[in-house]
Image (cartoon, rainbow, N blue to C red):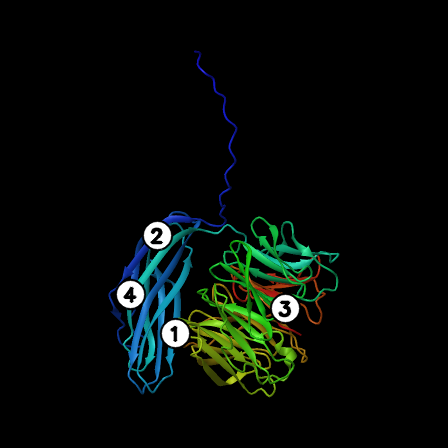
Amino acid sequence: GAAGNPSAGAPGPAGPIGPMGYGPGVIPVMGYNRSMTPVVFPSGTPGSWVTLNTIHNLLVSTDQLVVKLDAAFQLAFSSPPGLPRVLNITYQILRNGDPVYSNAVIYDQTRTGSSINFKGPVSLTFVDEPSAGSYTYTLRARVESQIGGYNPTVSERDFNASVFQKSTSPNYVYVAHLSPDESTALISYVDPVTNTITGASVPVGVATGGVPANLLNLAISPDETQLYVANLVDSSLYAVHLLTREAVKIYSFEQSWYTNAMLVTPDNNYLYAADLHSGIVKVFDAANKQFLYDLHTSSGENVSLTVSPDSSTVFVAINNMAGTPSARGIVDAIPVGTQSVTHDIFASLASQYGSPAYMEQVIPFAVVGYQGAYQIQALNVQTQDHSPGDIFSAPVNDLFNNQRITHPLLQSPLSMTGLPNNSRYIIQSDVDKIIRMNGNTVIESIDSYTDQREIAVTPDRKRICVLIRSSINQQQSGLQVISVIPAGISTPPSAFIPLASSGGMTITADSKYAYSLTFYPNPSFVNVYSANLISKTAREPLAMPGQVHAVVASYTRHSVISVSSMGG
C-alpha cells in the first residue's frame, strides 16, 4: 500500500532546570609541588632562609586573573627539660624572587619542667594579583630567634597555586533599615567608593514604628552571595540573594523568639541563629535554606556566637547571671553538623561583674591561632576595681585541656581579635590601653582611649581597628587604626579618625573602608558613618531613608553590627 505518513507525537514534559552558578570561575591553570624530604633549619638568629617549595613558570594570561597560593607543611622541634622554650619563625612567599607575603609565628612553650617533642601543621593562604606574565613562586622560612635546645625541622609540605578570574561582584556594604514611614524593613546596597545607595532596596518583611534597636539581625555567607536577615517584628528569617536582589522567606520563628546573633560556617554549609532568652540555637542547612534542628545550650541568655576557621566547632557565649553578680558566664561548644553540645568549657567567666545588666550584651571571646592550631579564648572582664583580668583558653580539638592566663596589664578586658600568626589584640573598657599578645605572652601595651567599644582586623590582616565612644570627659568618639606588625617589633603610633559613632563596625572586603552606626542613647538615628582606612580620614555621613538597624560588609566574624551589639 501507500507509504504511511505518521504525525509527530506530543512533546514530553520539560526536564528540571539545572543549577546556575554565581561568582568567579576557575581557569584551568594550576601549579603544585609536594616534597617529603625533611629540611633542618640552620643555626643562628636570624638564621639563613630555607626554601621549602617552588612552583615554576605559572602562566597568568591577562590582568583579570589572580593567583591563589595555598601552603601546608609539618613543623617539628624538640627541647630537653628545664629550659624555657620560645621559637620565632618567619614564613615568606616570593614572586620571581621578591617577597609578596610574610608572616611570623611564635611558639611559646611554658612546660619548663618536662621535655618537648612538638609536631604540628602550619598552613597559609595568600591571593596575589600580578599583571599578565609567567611567574615562579617560592615558599621559604627562617628562624628569627629561639630560646632553648631546639632542632626545628620541616617535613612533608605541599604548595599549590591556582589561577582564578577576578571577582566581578561589587564591593557593597549592606545596610538594614526601615522605610521612611517605618512600615517595611529594607536592605540597601551602598557603594563604599561613592558612599551612596545604589539600585533598588530589597524588602525583608514588615516593621513598625518605635521598634527595638535590633529589629534586624544579619549574617553574610562566606561566598558573599547570600545575606540572611532575622526580622524580629514579623518573626521571620529571610535569605537575600545578593547578586539577583531577590528575598525569600525561609523560616518563621516562634513569636517570643529574639534573634541575638547569627553566623554562617566558613564552609558555607550551616547557618546558626541564637535566641537571647530561650537557651536555644536553631541550625539551618544553608545550601538548601531548610531548618534542621534546635540545639539546647546551657541555661541562660545566648549572647554571641563564633566559629573555628576550619568549620569544626561553633561556640555560643551564655550569660546565666540570673540577676546576681556572682553567677557565671559560660561558653558552650557545638560540633558542627551534630546536635550535641559540650557544656561549660570555661567555669566562672565574668564572676567579678558588678552589674549583671552589662553582661547582657556580650561575653568577649574569639577563636585564635596558636602553635599551629586553633584555640577558643574567652575573657573574664573584671570591672569593679580594675583588678587584673583573665584569659581562659582551650584547644578546639581538646576543649577540656584548658588553661587560665593572667597578667597585670589586663584591666577590665572587653573584647579581642586574633590573627593567623598567633597574635591577638585586646581592648579594655575602662583603661586607655590596648594589649598586644603573641601566643599567650603579653608583648606590649599600646596607648589608646577610654571607653573602647569594639575591635576588628581588616580582611587583608594589615590593620587593627578600634571603635572609641565619646565619654563624660568630653573625649571625642572615633576610630583608632593600628598597623599589624611582625613579632619582635614595637607598634608604631596609631592614627585616630574622628567619627560621630558610638558602637559597632564593619569593614569592606577590600579593607579600604570601615563603617559604623550611631545609636546612643536611642535607635532613632538614620546616619551611617564611614572612614577611609588608607588615607585615615572621616567621610561625610550617609543619611538612610529610615531608621538604621544593622550593617554588614565582608565575611568575617566581626563584620555584622546592630544597634544593640555593645550596649549603652
* Number of marks in the rendered image: 4
State the separation of the CA atoms marked 3 and 2: 45 Å
Disc nearest the viewer among 4 and 2: 4
Q: Which residue is mark 3?
A: 499
Labels 3 and 1: the sequence-earlier one: 1
- Is residue 174 left or right of 407 when viewed as pictured? right
Q: Give the residue type at disc 1.
A: Gln
Q: Give the residue type at disc 4.
A: Glu
Mark 1 falls on what kind of element?
loop
Query: Visible in this render: residue 376?
Result: yes
Residue 240, numbered circle: none
State the separation of the CA atoms marked 4 and 2: 20 Å
Residue occupying the point 33% across, 60% down: 159
Q: Which residue is mark 1?
A: 371
Q: Which residue is mark 2?
A: 30
| Crowd tier of the residue under label 3, counting other residues whose Cα lies within 10 Å: few below 14, some 14–19, many 20 or above | many
Labels 3 and 2: the sequence-earlier one: 2
- Depicted 137 relative to depicted 316: above or below: above
List x then y, in percent, for residue 311.
Answer: 46, 64
List x then y, in percent, for residue 372.
Answer: 38, 71
Residue 156, numbered circle: 4
- Is residue 391 left or right of 181 when viewed as pictured? left
